[in-house]
Image (spheres, rainbow, N blue to C red):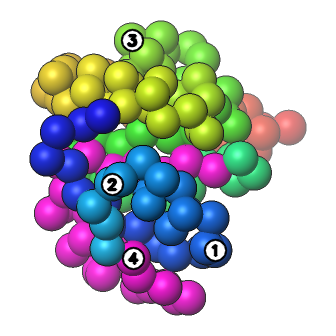
């Protein structure tokens, strides 16, 4: 689906290995029980794109680490955090975590627009931090 792709992933269970074999995707698995932030950054920056999909997790820190390092990251649709920024959301939020065809399209779209994705992320982050600061100040005033 994506020419010359190679996936490094955290092996949480055997289903991922079965899926990658079925799709004939070259991969290297790791079994990471605990990983330090420095190690995550080291792995994240080596990639063209990072993918952090989950059916249950709201939003994994790998997303923020990746984006802060200038490497786009695709996430699942378990968060409404980007609903106010459709420019960013269209590139990073999958519509179906378990649909490899849709995710391949999203990955290609994200990679083709990498500079804009990072720019949209930085804009979102500034706006989000401003709102967060205002909310904290309002909370402390009460």
Q: Position of residue 102 (x, y in %)?
A: 47, 24
- How far apart are labels 2 and 3 at the CA level? 30 Å
**Could you say which disc has been placed on residue 87 in the image?**
3
Task: Please name which of the two marks, 2 or 3, marks the residue nearer to the observer.
Answer: 2
Whether residue 130 is visible: no
Q: Position of residue 95 (x, y in %)?
A: 59, 23
User: Taking 99 as reference, is 10 above or below it?
Assistant: below
User: Taking 46 as reference, is 67 above or below it?
Assistant: above
Q: For this rendering, which residue is in front, 34 or 17?
A: 17
Q: Position of residue 50 (x, y in %)?
A: 33, 51
Tell me the element at label 1.
loop
Going from N to C along the chain, the mark reached first, 2 or 3, is 2
Please state if 127 lies on the left or on the right of 78 as rendered: left
Q: Residues within 10 Å of mark 3 (few under 14, many from 20)?
A: some
Tell me the element at label 2.
loop
- How far apart are labels 4 and 1 at the CA level? 11 Å
- How far apart are labels 4 and 3 at the CA level? 33 Å
Residue ID for mark 2: 25
- How far apart are labels 2 and 1 at the CA level? 17 Å
Going from N to C along the chain, the mark reached first, 1 or 3, is 1
Task: Please name which of the two marks, 2 or 1, marks the residue nearer to the observer.
Answer: 2
Please state if 40 lies on the left or on the right of 11 as rendered: left
Q: Quadrant of the N terminus?
A: top left
Q: Quadrant of the C terminus?
A: top right
Residue ID for mark 1: 13
Going from N to C along the chain, the mark reached first, 2 or 1, is 1
Pointer 4 and pointer 1: residues touching (CB < 8 Å)? no
Whether residue 107 is visible: yes
Pointer 2 and pointer 4: residues touching (CB < 8 Å)? no
Task: Please name which of the two marks, 4 or 3, marks the residue nearer to the observer.
Answer: 4
């Amino acid at each position: 689906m994506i020419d010359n792709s190679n996936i490094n992933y955290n092996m949480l269970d055997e289903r991922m290995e079965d899926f990658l074999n079925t799709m004939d995707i070259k991969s290297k698995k790791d079994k990471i029980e605990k990983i330090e932030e420095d190690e995550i950054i080291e792995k994240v920056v080596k990639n063209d794109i990072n993918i952090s999909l989950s059916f249950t997790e709201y939003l994994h820190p790998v997303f923020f680490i990746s984006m802060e390092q200038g490497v786009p990251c695709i996430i699942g649709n378990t968060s409404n955090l980007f609903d106010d920024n459709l420019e960013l959301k269209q590139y990073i939020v999958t519509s179906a975590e378990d649909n490899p065809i849709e995710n391949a399209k999203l990955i290609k779209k994200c990679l083709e627009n990498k500079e804009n994705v990072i720019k949209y992320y930085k804009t979102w982050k500034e706006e989000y931090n401003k709102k967060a600061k205002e909310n904290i100040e309002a909370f402390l005033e009460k």
